[in-house]
Amino acid sequence: MKRLVESSGVEVAFREVDVVTTGTFGAMCSSGAIINVGHSDPPIKIEKAWINDVPICHPGAAVDLYIGATSMSERQRLEYGGGHVIEDLVSGKEVELKATAYGTDCYPRTQVKTRLTKDDLNQFYLLNFRNCYQRYNCAVNGSDETIYTYMGKLLPRLRNATFSGAGELNPLMNDPDYETIGIGTRIFLGGSQGYVISEGTQHDPQNSFGTIMVRGDAKQMSPEFLRGASFTGYGNTLYVGLGIPIPILNEGLAKKVAIRDEKIFTNVVDYSVPRKDRPKLAQVSYKELKSGAITVNDRKIKVSSLSSLKTARKIAGTLKSWIANGEFFLTSPVERLPVDSVFKSMRQTEGTPFVVSVMQKPVTCYADEDIRAIAERIVTRSVNHIIVVDEDEKLGGIVTSWDITRAMAEGKTALADIMTRRVVTAKPDEPLDAASRRMAQHNISALPVIDAKRKVLGIVTAEDVSKLLGR
């Protein structure tokens, strides 16, 4: 369709084409499934439940359960979760259900343990609160250490970038004003047919971050288009295949579905900053993203996709064949999706402590100073950490009271021989929780606080954190 518009024009394309199919296949954490397991004998009013050791939410009556894609196994944690449970059920595998209850006169049973397949369930519906993002940020990491995120593994100092989405093949990008997509629209979902039931959570159409809420009968779905996944160091999710047919009702739609990747832009965002308003370093097109490299501040960065464009194309092609063979019928939405929604952040009634609120004035030294002088400074200033800086006050290393004690016991006199050069740091505007977690991860008790040019601004210690939490 895009080539047809480019070669023959919008009017010709409008006359010749009735429907354009779209597709996307990527990780969507806001996915899950509703199941009804039926009543046991004697009956149980489930209070807590687990499937394959994954905690399952109990949102309704006695035996209605919701499997969240990001729930983690209590035994395998980051390696197996709710997304994998959904895939196992869709694949026809047997899963183990355990449940407990407090017992009532009409539901006397207090525990149950059994094995189930999807054929044993009364209902098994995929229900995704948010899916099919119109576009997504490109993620990088500007810090000095590797971080693990829902955008995958990000190497330090902008050494790689990741992105998600199908770009010009994405359903919402081809009908950005939702002329044909709304409540009741029949769609390809997980290898079967499903429906749009609402705008998705965090729907933000004014910034081209539209989403949709969808449901479908998971008993009819295929593991080819519904896959549980684990992101290293982050957790579990579910890859969901979704496609939407767009009937070409007017020339305006014919023009919209002709959009190309070079016209679709997104922000390159630094995910090392654990804040809502992360720094935006550049804007890039999906054409650049799909090329394998982007340029940020005159620097070329390798980029990889978290989505499968190959599977997205297969979804669009499968949907086309269903329509052509009379196996899939298009539906008019009973209500259009909102185009003026505003995505709001959480209202917070309690302040969040940041590193800047607890950091102390640093005690510093230079790399050519004598160890005995550093030892005297530790005693007179009553500190356990001395930050090594250069003449511009930029971070060069760190030395602790333990380092000094060991050096003096071993007869060493050069600071350069004992200081730690690869220093784990903090930024003044990051939440104290993040700094505390970093100290625990690296088994250290202090973090030098630096700015973007590595100039030392202060130091935050485990003692500072403990005092604040104690208050």
Image (cartoon, rainbow, N blue to C red):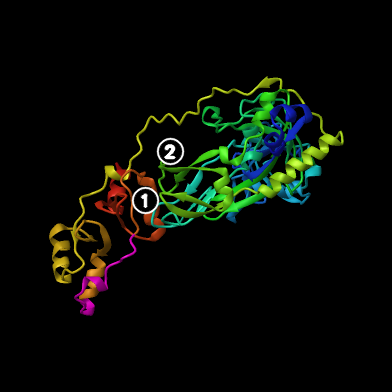
Neighbor class of circle 1 (other Cα within 10 Å; few <14, some 14-19, many 20+) is: many
Residue type of the residue flagged with mark 1: Ser
Neighbor class of circle 2 (other Cα within 10 Å; few <14, some 14-19, many 20+) is: few
Secondary structure character of the magenta stretch overall:
loop
Q: Which mark is residue 276?
A: 2
Work out which residue is located at the far right of the displayed protein and give it: 325
Residue pictured at 35% horizontal, 34% vertical: 351
User: From which residue to which does the magenta span run?
Assistant: 409-423
Which residue is nearer to you in this view: 117 or 111? 117
Which residue is nearer to you in this view: 130 or 236? 130
Tell me if I can see residue 252 in this picture. yes
Q: Which mark is residue 345?
A: none
Depicted 367 relative to depicted 62: above or below:
below
Q: Tell me if residue 300 is in the magenta stretch.
A: no
Q: Which residue position is annotated with label 1?
A: 436
Tell me residue 103's x, y (percent).
66, 37
Image check: 454 left or right of 66? left
Which quadrant would the C terminus be assigned to in this image? top left
Which residue is nearer to you in this view: 371 or 390? 390
Which of the marked residues, 2 or 1, is nearer the chain's N terminus?
2
Q: Tell me if residue 417 is in the magenta stretch.
A: yes
Residue pictured at 40% horizontal, 31% vertical: 348
Which quadrant would the N terminus be assigned to in this image? top right
Residue pictured at 63% horizontal, 24% vertical: 337
